[in-house]
Amino acid sequence: MIKSKITSMFLILGLLITNLFCCFVSAAKPKTLLKYAPYHDQIYYDKIQKKKYTSEEIQTIENFLKETVNESDFSMATHIECMNSIIDEDKIKSSVQINWDSIKNSKCDKQHIDRRWATSEIFNVDISELEASDYEKYGYLSCKDKRQDIEDGSDVLVYYGNVIMNLKKENVLDRTTLTIGDSLNNRWTLGERSITPTLANNPRITCIPGHSRRLARLISQQIKSGSISPKHPNLINKIRKKHLDFSYIELQIHGELSFEKDVESIHIIKLKTTDEEENAQQEQLQQEIKEKIQKLGKPCYIVDCTDANLNKIHKTTSLKKL
């Protein structure tokens, strides 16, 4: 009898510990990913059953994605004028978080481009449960050699800014999803439910936009021919398919991002401008930011790309999706 009571007590204690652990894990997991894994898997197996891809395409693309995640940096680009606030506040914010006061009462997504509503639909989460800080932050897979990214044709710098923050992969891997191409633009082009980001720690073929068998075949062929490579992820922009945007392999990072804790290194890309005065101002600001970052103990490099064939950085779009 005593043994039975002791056994029951240990079983109850074990269940309590298990429940507490599960509650801790749920609390630690970003809201946008709480219900996402089973939702993603359901879509994945549904597409497999409907033979959206061949077994060869699945193996080729998924092996490529796993190797690319392993070989690449998890990077985010922003404009240099934003760096002081990022460092001082120790926060990397999404555009929704930055503009929360003006969009938090939005009731619709008429053109299917409102990031606040797209998040709810893409990640299967109730929009009423999300606060400003819950929205995903946007990055991309980048080559270790940032100069090489430019030579590979990456236009991330043109649209988002010339400061590249490389994240500590071990800090964010388990809370990062990815898509081949720009998730919002492709959702706008192909319609709702056309984008299914995949988990970066186990990437699946469902991250290809739309449901086109031809597109999976094309990407698979490009991988096998060596036209795109795990060590050169931004060669993905060489793929042209109708109006789809394959400028980069996009990352969606979920949960809070701290500059101090989550950023590993920084590359400031020095680009040619047509205005000499602005060029001088940029050089001075670059040096100031570099010194400020180095005082925090983080590696910071200025990469001279003044001879690269890139347009002047567009300040008005530098915060579009960060």
Image: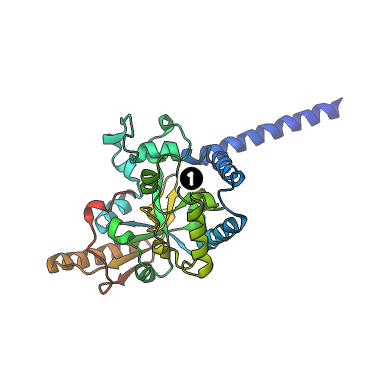
Residue at the extreme right of the image, as rendered: 1
Nearer to the camera, 260 or 283: 283
Q: Position of residue 126 (x, y in %)?
A: 45, 31
- Quarter of the figure with the N terminus: top right
Residue 71 appears in the rendering: no
Q: Is residue 293 above or below residue 95?
A: below
Residue 262: image quadrant is: bottom left
Q: Position of residue 195 (x, y in %)?
A: 45, 45
Residue occupying the point 57% across, 61% down:
60
Q: Is residue 195 above or below residue 56?
A: above
Residue 188 appears in the rendering: yes
Which residue in the protein does label 1 denote?
196
Residue at the extreme bottom of the image, as rendered: 307
Give the number of callouts. 1
21 horizontally vs 153: left or right: right
Query: Element type at marker 1?
Result: loop
Q: Is residue 4 above or below residue 283?
A: above
Nearer to the camera, 92 or 294: 92
Q: Position of residue 220 (x, y in %)?
A: 52, 61
Q: Position of residue 86 (x, y in %)?
A: 31, 52
Q: Is residue 96 above or below residue 316?
A: above
Q: Amino acid at mark 1?
A: Thr
Residue occupying the point 24% across, 56% down:
81
Q: Residues within 10 Å of mark 1 (few under 14, many from 20)?
A: many
Q: Coloring scheme of the render?
A: rainbow
